[in-house]
Image: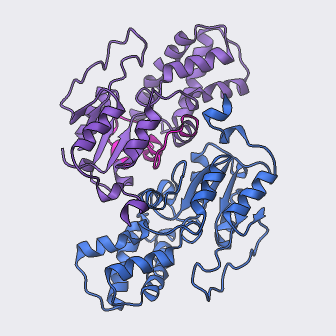
Chain colours: A blue, B purple
């Protein structure tokens, strides 16, 4: 691994705790259902919905739209009746999620040395509102929203790297998911694995350990910062006006 | 004008002083030429280069590429010899520009109530690096980089508005240029004019006053904030986790 200038982060699961976030939002808005069961059911519809786009059976639509459609299915499963505008409101659960402990502080620390941006399957809308809610100090919003393609499609990574004006090897993908790392590595990006072992609750069985040859494995974003800082001095691209003069 | 949730800013001329920025950068790197004359000559190539893309004669390329091509022409005019990598370096002048006085503080103030983003003809690369350099606290980067179209093409505004998940009338365009406002207004955006009367130096003859029926005219971003705050309370979309709970 050479010096990197930018870090791209997966967001749902890696930066924010979507399961607790959705459960809390749902329990405030509905109350009648098991909120974790509801969150899991909603999330289970996520991959099949994106698969339709990835396969070309459907044109790209922002993830907000897929979540909203999936919500109709899940509400039907749970026998919940709800007006359309209330459903629109519930769909905003994905814009209001708690960050994992220390994410904001650790991202701010990483930002001092690196360009930082989300490379999520979430839309620009979701990423922007979520960043405001959770105080995530992104330099810009990349990922599916600018590529109009969902990870792990190569375009989602390559358009994000291209938008930074950098070669792929100077950009590091940072997710809690091995599959995301494998796809990023295949496109030439540097890789860092940060496990989130309770993303799916205390019985989680996947992504507990690295399953590939990743450049960095760190137990937290703080440890990632430690490891990156130990590698050498800042690169000029990561510097601000104050640093340069 | 109804309540707006987001403010889109023109950047070169409106937020940063490109002319002094380029002149200062050029004088550090070359030294032999009149730096303001050089800056003006470089900028004069900007509109004709984009016109080729707007007319469809050429596919969209990021503005970095156009500036780099234009630089070759300008260096030839000024009889300056320079290696390719030095030219690449000089092209980064557009990533390192001084903000107009108080821009950073005023943007931070506006960010407390509104989503703020650049809607510039600059690429995501330029906007991201410039934001780091000049400490511009954008929520996300919109504009030509995501639309793959240059203002005043409708798509540059409409894709930016769409990426925020908002109707056009809830988004306000804030440039120092009347032509930008006319194009934004034609697409249904709210409009605010903030003149920068020395963008082209002390003999500037254009954009000294509003020439259209804009929703707001303000002498500075601080005055824009005053006027917007006087219109009423914050909208939930502009609120952070701390505000909501």
In the rendered image, residue A166, in percent from the top left (x then y), is placed at: 66, 44
In the rendered image, residue B214, in percent from the top left (x then y), is placed at: 21, 33
Position of residue B111 relative to residue B16, above or below, is below
- Residue ID at (51%, 61%): A149
In the rendered image, residue A111, in percent from the top left (x then y), is placed at: 62, 49
- Residue ID at (33%, 74%): A90
Seen in the image, is A2 located left or right of residue A76? right
- Residue ID at (36%, 18%): B197
Seen in the image, is A144 located left or right of residue A102? left
Quadrant where the image shows the N terminus of chain A: bottom right
Which stretch is magenta?
B131-160
Q: Is residue A186 visible?
A: no
Residue in the foreground of this view, choosing between B192 and A106: A106
The quarter of the picture where residue B78 lies is top right
Position of residue A176 relative to residue A35, above or below, is above
Give yes or no for residue A157 being in the magenta stretch. no
The quarter of the picture where residue B15 lies is top left
Seen in the image, is A221 located left or right of residue B57? right
Q: Is residue A182 visible?
A: yes
Residue in the foreground of this view, choosing between A168 and A218: A218
Give yes or no for residue B141 being in the magenta stretch. yes
Residue in the foreground of this view, choosing between A222 and A11: A222
- Labels in figure, total: 0
In the rendered image, residue B106, in percent from the top left (x then y), is placed at: 40, 37
Quadrant where the image shows the C terminus of chain A: top right
Position of residue A3 relative to residue A83, above or below, is above
The quarter of the picture where residue A25 lies is bottom left
- Residue ID at (53%, 27%): B98
């Amino acid at each position: 691994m050479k010096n990197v200038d930018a870090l791209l982060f997966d967001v749902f699961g890696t930066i924010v705790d979507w399961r607790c976030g959705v459960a809390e939002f749902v329990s405030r808005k509905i109350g009648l259902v098991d909120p974790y069961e509801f969150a899991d059911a909603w999330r289970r519809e996520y991959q099949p919905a994106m698969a339709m786009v990835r396969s070309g059976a459907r044109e790209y639509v922002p993830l907000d739209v897929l979540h909203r459609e999936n919500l109709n299915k899940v509400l039907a499963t749970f026998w919940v009746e709800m007006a359309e505008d209330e459903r629109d409101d519930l769909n905003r659960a994905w814009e209001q999620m708690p960050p994992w402990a220390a994410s904001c502080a650790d991202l701010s620390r990483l930002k001092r040395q690196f360009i930082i941006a989300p490379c999520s399957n979430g839309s620009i809308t979701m990423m922007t509102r979520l960043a405001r809610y959770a105080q995530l100090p992104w330099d810009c919003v990349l990922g599916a929203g600018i590529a109009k393609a969902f990870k792990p499609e190569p375009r989602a990574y390559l358009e994000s790297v291209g938008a930074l004006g950098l070669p792929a090897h100077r950009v590091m993908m940072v997710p809690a998911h091995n599959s995301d790392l494998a796809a990023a590595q295949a496109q030439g990006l540097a890789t860092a694995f940060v496990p989130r072992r309770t993303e799916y609750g205390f019985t989680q069985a996947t992504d507990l350990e690295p399953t590939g040859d990743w450049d960095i494995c760190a137990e937290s974003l703080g440890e990632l910062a430690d490891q990156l800082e130990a590698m050498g001095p800042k690169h000029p691209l990561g510097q601000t006006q104050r640093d340069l003069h």
